[in-house]
Amino acid sequence: MNQMEMVSLDQLVPRTHMYRRFIKLWDFKGVEAILSTVKSLNPHEGYGLNRLFRCLLLQFMEDLSDRELEKFLQENISGRWFCGFMLNEDTPDHTVFTRARSKIGTDLLATLFQELRDQLKKQGYMNEVFTFVDASHLIAKANLWEERDEAIRQKYEKLNNEILPKVAVDKQARIGCKGKNKYWYGYKKHVSVDMQSGLINKIAVTPANLTDAQGLKHVCPSQGAIYADKGYCTKPAKQAAAKRNSHLAAIKKNNMKDKNADQDR
């Protein structure tokens, strides 16, 4: 004789599960209001952008590919609960996540990120008293042979940041340099981190030839002290910090007259 027990999906997710803590932390009503401004995906898919956004959020939290996320939602009860799917409900295949990501777009994702950041600030998890800022390179291509050949075909004498947009498929990527001889082609990622919580406060991507100091204006906090390396001790960074009423505490270069080694330590 088979015994049947009626349980809800909510009962199967432990009360101490990380997903429950996350949902308690982030009020998704603001997310729903933002996503309501976007036209839904094709009616036959029928999942809704709200649930698909939670899928993309889960994908980031668990570091999954689109195909891995598809399988994860099929097999993981807590993942289903987090994204709003019932036990007997079909979950999206990997192609749906790609279309959802394109439909939401980078600008709206930035707005959603800001909405989460503002909620964390209101709850006291983040502040802008002490902020650490840094930049890192993002390589678009490991080599530029095709661009070089196209530049030769068009009779350009050099392949530099002035010529690249004319011969490259990626019109926004540029050649960047770290130090005297470390070059790469692509972009630069600028990040500011709240030093109290360790959480990312702001993030921006620029062409690779923009200096760290020039990129500060994109991630500069609105108050407090900014701690950074020698790349931020120049005029553009000082101007960006002053405009936001922040105090720039960047390490000075060795040849600067007001260099203070004790303070740097």
Image (tube, rainbow, N blue to C red):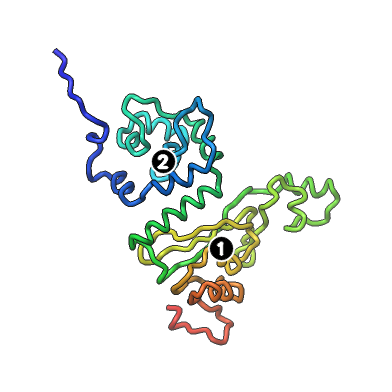
In the image, farthest residue toward the right: 155
Checking the image for residue 218, the label placed there is: 1
Q: Residue at x 36, y 61 (%)?
A: 122
In screen coordinates, is 31 left or right of 184?
left
10 Å crowding of disc 1: few (<14), some (14-19), many (20+): some
Between 74 and 8, the residue placed more toward the observer is 8
Rendered view: 217 above or below 19 = below
- Residue behind mark 2: 54
- Disc 2 marks a residue whose amino acid type is Arg
Task: Please identify the quadrant where the N terminus is shown.
Answer: top left
Q: Position of residue 8 (x, y in %)?
A: 24, 30
Between 73 and 157, the residue placed more toward the observer is 73
In screen coordinates, is 72 left or right of 180?
left
Rendered view: 124 above or below 27 = below
- Disc 1 marks a residue whose amino acid type is His
Rendered view: 12 above or below 222 = above
Between 96 and 259, the residue placed more toward the observer is 96
In the image, farthest residue toward the left: 1
Q: Position of residue 59 (x, y in %)?
A: 42, 41
